[in-house]
Amino acid sequence: MHIAVNAYFWNRPNSGTGQYTRQLVYHLNRLVSDLDITLVYPQIPDQPAIPEQVPPSVKVKAVPTRPGHLGKVWFEQVGFPRASQEIGAAVAHVPYWGSPLRSPLPVVVTVHDLTTLLVREYRRGARARLYTALVSAAARGAAHILTDSQASKRDILTHLALPAEKVTVVYLAAAPQFTTQANLLLDRAIRQKYDLPDFFTLYLGGYELHKNVLTLLHAYTYVGQALGTDYPLLLAGHKPEISGANYPDYDDYIQRSQIEPYVRWLGYVDEEDKPSLYREAMCFAFPSRQEGFGLPPLEALACGTPVVATNASSLPEIVGDAAFAVDPDDARGMAGAIIAVLIEDNLAADLRKRGPVQARQFSWEKAATETLLVYDAAANSS
């Protein structure tokens, strides 16, 4: 069987969709000998002309594409389905919520979550509303939908009004490099590279409104008062350049809350540095309100780092009983959980044992196998 994969996010491995696309293709290519895979790649001016780190046996079909939002929509709706037909694929897979409204071959689309539909602030712009309406209609016409969790499946069935048999949950997994096996020289080098303090709580992820980082900062008003500057909060990931409805003004909040001594922006972290960064942290905090899966807390668990997450959307499915799960609006409860992890050695040791066990329940081999079954069913449905 020949599969065409939309590779729009292939060269963005720091994004959840980029990680998902790469890991799925890597494992499908390694596990299934009679599966041909072609990445349909948008060739955009001033961006890499070819996708990076493609396995030798995976083919690439480049499609010249304009930059910007209109170019992305054209690629999704016209360029990708046309190229998929030209290469003779049996099934087209769009690994994010952006499938074509019409396609000459069966389409499998991965709808990780419905965040852009469920969070009111993300629907305020006319362009956002039009795009959400387009991809919602396209998803209803797909041969099958994959999603990352039971929570996301419930949202899809409710808000896209689809029959349950058309939606399959395939859990993601932490990549193999996220492990408790420390490389002392590498970990020491990472500590020096980012000038890490001796003890710290880590947040690593996005800063959109639904990530709920303001509640974590509110929690740190209590943590800072209780523990002082010896246990700062490090904020890793791209700091928003502007504030608005989708991105709160974090610096203003930090200043008004007088928590500057307890909070530090770490900034962008190279993908290969993340395992060491997780292992060096005493606690990983993930305050999100809406997640299709939530790879960062699972990566932290795989590295043996105690996790404080929320009990919202998919996160209870992912962390199980291996992490603290608090209400996303309960800043005091979040602070109490963080403080407990930081100062209770026995509790932290127990969570360090539970984390890797929980993470091993998820594997990319299983995800690839379950995805292949969906490809087979979609190909036979045409």
Image (cartoon, rainbow, N blue to C red):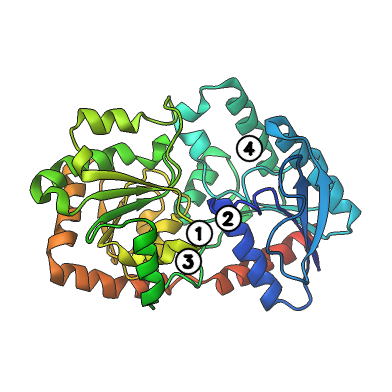
Mark 2: give few (<14), some (14-19) or many (20+) Cα within 10 Å: some
Mark 4: give few (<14), some (14-19) or many (20+) Cα within 10 Å: many
Q: Which dot, 2 or 4, sits closer to the camera?
A: 2
Q: On screen, 180 above or below 67?
A: below
Mark 3: give few (<14), some (14-19) or many (20+) Cα within 10 Å: many
User: Looking at the picture, how far across and down is residue 299, in whole percent?
Assistant: 42, 64
For the residues marked 2 and 4, what is the alpha-carbon distance in whole angstroms?
25 Å
Residue at left offset 15%, top offset 47%: 223
Query: Mark 1 or mark 2: which comes first in sequence?
Result: 2
Question: Is 147 or 348 nearer to us in this picture?
Answer: 348
Q: Which dot, 3 or 1, sits closer to the camera?
A: 1
Question: Is 43 or 18 nearer to us in this picture?
Answer: 43
Reading the image, the residue beneath label 1 is 271
Q: Which dot, 1 or 2, sits closer to the camera?
A: 1
For the residues marked 4 and 1, what is the alpha-carbon distance in whole angstroms?
32 Å
SS type, badge 1: helix
Reading the image, the residue beneath label 4 is 136
Kind of residue sitting beneath label 2: Pro
SS type, badge 2: loop
Query: Mark 4 or mark 1: which comes first in sequence?
Result: 4
For the residues marked 3 and 1, what is the alpha-carbon distance in whole angstroms?
13 Å
Q: On screen, 89 above or below 349?
A: above
Reading the image, the residue beneath label 3 is 174
Q: Which mark is residue 91?
A: none
Query: Mark 3 or mark 1: which comes first in sequence?
Result: 3
